[in-house]
Amino acid sequence: MLAYERFGTGEPLVLVHGISHRRQAWYPVAERLAEHREVILFDLPGHGESPELVMDGRPVKDVLQGQLIDFFDELGLEQPHIAGNSLGGRIALEAAADGLVSSATALAPAGFWKHPIDFAYIKTHFLLLNIGAQVVAPIAPTLAKYDLGRRLMLSSLMVHGENLDADRVVGDLHAMLGARTALRRIIAAGTAWESEIDPSIPVTIAWGDKDRVLLPHQAEHARRELPHADHVWLRGSGHVPMSDDVDSVVDVLLQGSSQGLRSITAHVA
């Protein structure tokens, strides 16, 4: 069973974090969302408090899809709304392509690189990020006491790392180191987006214009690949925008999940 939290009222909205992160990535926006949605946060396999990512000879995409379907079944979720960041955004879009959800909102989703050089940059970025985390780990509790320290430690992922408290920053760093095996397996199996999403399923894609991981030009490629989606810029936000601009991210997630099969059915009824 994947580690998860479930709270709030309204239609269910499943939130999927990015690679090397954990469900706490959504904490900055979760309480606000819970005023309007039943919020479900969970740790991906090999991340946070969830069990290891077990491949058993299967492709990573199939493993993650199977885990998501099992998770929906265990929680009694039938076509919930879903949103994700980075790898989580890719998972959300794939869930929409598979017809598993009522709507999908993706914040800087993975898979929209245009050239192998883009993907090589991403792999190098995460390699250096992990090396940096290992080097900084012994002094992280001290650095995290200071706004500048938190901002510098998280500068490749977000613009305003100082918005997070010290315990969160240190916890995220240890979660990143703990997810190294899953990171290697997922990155090694990385593929560009090839799926199609039925236009009847509402899709929103939002991208921080200060993203240093999945560079903003990928947003234009996503626009071409998914022309039926709503495409939004998060001005002044980095790759993990939930901490950079709480108000805008909450608005995007609520708007993105305000339509869909569940909502349409309820309205018709």
Image (cartoon, grey):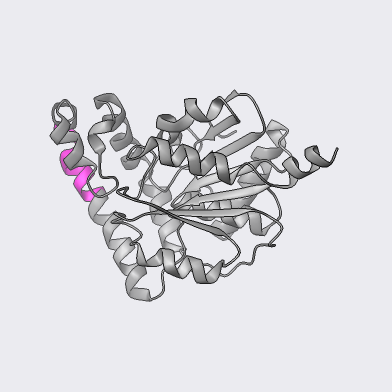
Direction bottom: furthest residue: 115
Residue in view at x 50 percent, y 44 percent: 252
The residue closer to the viewer here, 53 or 195, is 195
Q: Residue 109 in the image: x percent, y percent?
A: 46, 56
**Vertical comparison of 252 with 27: above or below:** below
Task: Give the residues in magenta.
Answer: 130-139
The residue closer to the viewer here, 241 or 43, is 241
Residue in view at x 16 percent, y 43 percent: 135
**Quadrant position of the C terminus in the picture:** top right
Position of 263 compared to 147: left or right?
A: right
**Quadrant position of the N terminus in the picture:** top right
Q: Please say whether residue 15 is one of the residues in the magenta stretch.
A: no
Residue in view at x 57 percent, y 67 percent: 227
**Vertical comparison of 232 with 152: above or below:** below
Q: Residue 24 in the image: x percent, y percent?
A: 42, 32
Work out whether residue 219 can be spotted.
yes
Q: Residue 203 in the image: x percent, y percent?
A: 59, 54
Position of 38 compared to 85: left or right?
A: right
The residue closer to the viewer here, 57 or 194, is 194
Q: Residue 62 in the image: x percent, y percent?
A: 61, 57
Magenta stretch, main secondary structure, is helix
**Vertical comparison of 146 with 21: above or below:** above
Quarter of the image where one finds residue 39: top right
Work out whether residue 56 can be spotted.
no
